[in-house]
């Protein structure tokens, strides 16, 4: 049985953006002899809004699946998180779907996976809200940064998280099918750039398709392939004149590349991801935030960030989180310590910063950026260092 540490080591490679073949999803270390199960939890959102959530099955009939040619259409699962009018009678959603949970946390593991703070199918609150897209790291699922996603929703944003099918390790569809990671490894070192370029292009196409379907929802249509009813009021909650995007690792690179080719995305944020694609040459003329780990060795620094910084012609921000690691911008930063993983095994992945404090620092900066550039409010944290958050360093 793989341990949580081994699983996350594989996840670290995938989230770093290497187009290598994915390992099977990690399972949690067995605690059968250690007493009661450990219940893993996510930190409570900090905003005043209650949260609703709904998962949608979307089918793009204009293109076959790029990774499994036998699949003649591209199928995606997305999840929408939004401020809710009321949540009574609407249960809290699980962190991952039942089929995925069975793969990563089999019976007898000694762990109970988290329950989110989003209530399934709750009616949407009144008022049109800015929309923020989220793309996970390479090989990761849409749930990867739920702690950040929920917090944005609790402060009045609609957040749409995307599972990139056959890029993610597992994607479960409503009929119980589970699509697995199927991206072939590069043929050799000379093929890595082109392989990663294709992964990036597929993610951009996925995101633009999802934006099209959000437009359909806002016009009163229901694009869900399974025909499930949409939450009441959701169509009127989407303000698609104010769209942003963020992502962890390769998801951050996808945010920048999507902005380059689709002007519907007005602001973007990269969480510790290496930049790839045409955007490194063409640059961006709209707001962009780069939030990364504070790597101690110059050899670990990402040179594409220096290159991208010079190509940003709109409002630009570059901040580093002290003592963070590459996976500090995912839910693993809070779940790994809860699992009892020894610090010497987890620190190469999530750094030495306390996971709860890491999330508490990240959330206001992510929110301040989208508040300023989508909500036309606040954003004072972006002006420079804050005594409240000394862990965040401004560059250059």
Image (tube, grey):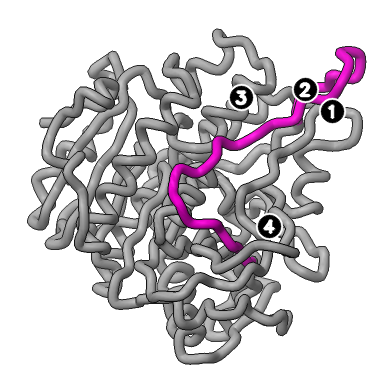
Report the mark closest to the observer, 2 or 3. Answer: 3
Residue at image point 36% right, 17% down: 323
Range covered by the magenta-colored residues: 28-54
Question: Which residue has dot 2 on it?
Answer: 29
The residues bearing labels 2 and 3 have C-alpha atoms spaced at a distance of 11 Å
Residue for point 69% across, 52% down:
170
Residues at marks 1 and 3, CA–CA distance in whole angstroms: 14 Å
Q: Quadrant of residue 134?
A: bottom left
Q: Is label 2 in a helix, a strand or a loop?
A: loop
Where disc 1 sits, the SS reads: loop
Q: Which mark is residue 336?
A: 3
Query: Residue beneath label 1, please?
Result: 109
| Mark 4 and mark 1 residues within 8 Å of each other at the beta carbon | no
Q: CA distance from mark 2 to mark 1?
A: 6 Å
Indicate whether 40 appears above or below 100: above
- Do labels 2 and 1 touch, CB within 8 Å? yes
Crowding near the residue tagged with mark 1, few <14, some 14–19, many ≥20 C-alpha atoms within 10 Å: some
Give the foreground label among 3 and 4. 3
In 3D space, how far apart are the residues under numbered discs 4 and 1 (Cα atoms)? Answer: 21 Å
**Quarter the C terminus occupies:** top left
Question: How packed is label 4: few (under 14 Cα within 10 Å), some, or many (20 or more)?
Answer: many
> How many neighbours does mark 2 have within 10 angstroms: few (below 14), some (14-19), or many (20 or more)?
many
User: Which residue in the structure is indicated by mark 4?
Assistant: 171
Name the front one of labels 4 and 1. 1
Say few, some or many: other residues with alpha carbon within 10 Å of mark 3 (under 14 / 14 to 19 / 20 or more).
many
Residue at x 27%, y 26% (from the top left corner): 389
The dominant secondary structure in magenta is loop
Disc with the residue nearer the chain's start (3 vs 4): 4
Residue 82 locus on image (x, y percent): 51, 64
Q: Earlier in the sequence, mark 2 or mark 3?
A: 2
Image vertical order of residue 17 relative to residue 36, above or below: below
For the residues marked 4 and 2, what is the alpha-carbon distance in whole angstroms? 22 Å
């Amino acid at each position: 049985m793989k341990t949580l540490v081994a699983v996350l080591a594989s996840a670290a490679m995938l989230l770093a953006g290497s187009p290598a073949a994915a390992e099977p999803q990690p399972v949690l270390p067995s605690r059968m002899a250690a007493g009661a199960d450990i219940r893993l939890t996510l930190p409570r959102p900090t905003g005043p809004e209650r949260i609703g959530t709904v998962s949608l099955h979307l089918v793009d009939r204009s293109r076959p699946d790029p990774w499994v040619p036998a699949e003649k259409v591209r199928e995606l699962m997305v999840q929408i998180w939004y401020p809710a009018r009321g949540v009574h009678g609407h249960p809290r959603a699980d962190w991952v779907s039942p089929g995925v949970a069975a793969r990563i946390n089999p019976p007898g593991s000694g762990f109970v996976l988290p329950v989110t703070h989003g209530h399934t199918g709750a009616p949407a609150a009144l008022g049109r809200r800015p929309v923020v897209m989220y793309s996970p790291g390479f090989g990761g699922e849409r749930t990867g940064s739920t702690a950040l996603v929920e917090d944005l929703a609790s402060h009045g944003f609609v957040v749409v998280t995307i599972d990139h099918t056959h890029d993610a390790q597992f994607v479960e569809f409503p009929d119980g099918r589970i699509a697995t990671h199927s991206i072939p490894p590069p043929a050799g070192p000379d093929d890595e750039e082109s392989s990663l370029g294709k992964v990036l292009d597929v993610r951009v196409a996925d995101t633009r398709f999802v934006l099209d379907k959000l437009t359909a929802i806002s016009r009163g249509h229901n694009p869900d392939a399974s025909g499930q009813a949409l939450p009441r009021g959701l169509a009127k909650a989407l303000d698609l004149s104010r769209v942003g995007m963020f992502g962890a690792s390769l998801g951050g690179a996808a945010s920048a590349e999507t902005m380059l080719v689709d002007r519907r995305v007005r602001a973007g944020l990269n969480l510790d991801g290496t930049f790839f694609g045409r955007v490194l040459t063409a640059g961006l003329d709209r707001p962009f935030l780069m939030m990364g780990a504070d790597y101690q060795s110059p050899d670990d620094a990402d040179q594409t960030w220096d290159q991208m910084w010079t190509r940003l012609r709109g409002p630009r921000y570059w901040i580093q989180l002290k003592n963070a690691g590459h996976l500090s911008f995912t839910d693993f930063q809070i779940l790994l310590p809860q699992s009892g993983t020894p610090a010497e095994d987890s620190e190469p992945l999530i750094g030495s910063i306390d996971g709860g404090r890491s999330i508490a620092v990240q959330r206001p900066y992510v929110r301040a950026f989208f508040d300023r550039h989508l909500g036309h409010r606040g954003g004072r944290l972006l002006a420079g260092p804050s005594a409240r958050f000394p862990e965040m360093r401004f560059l250059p």
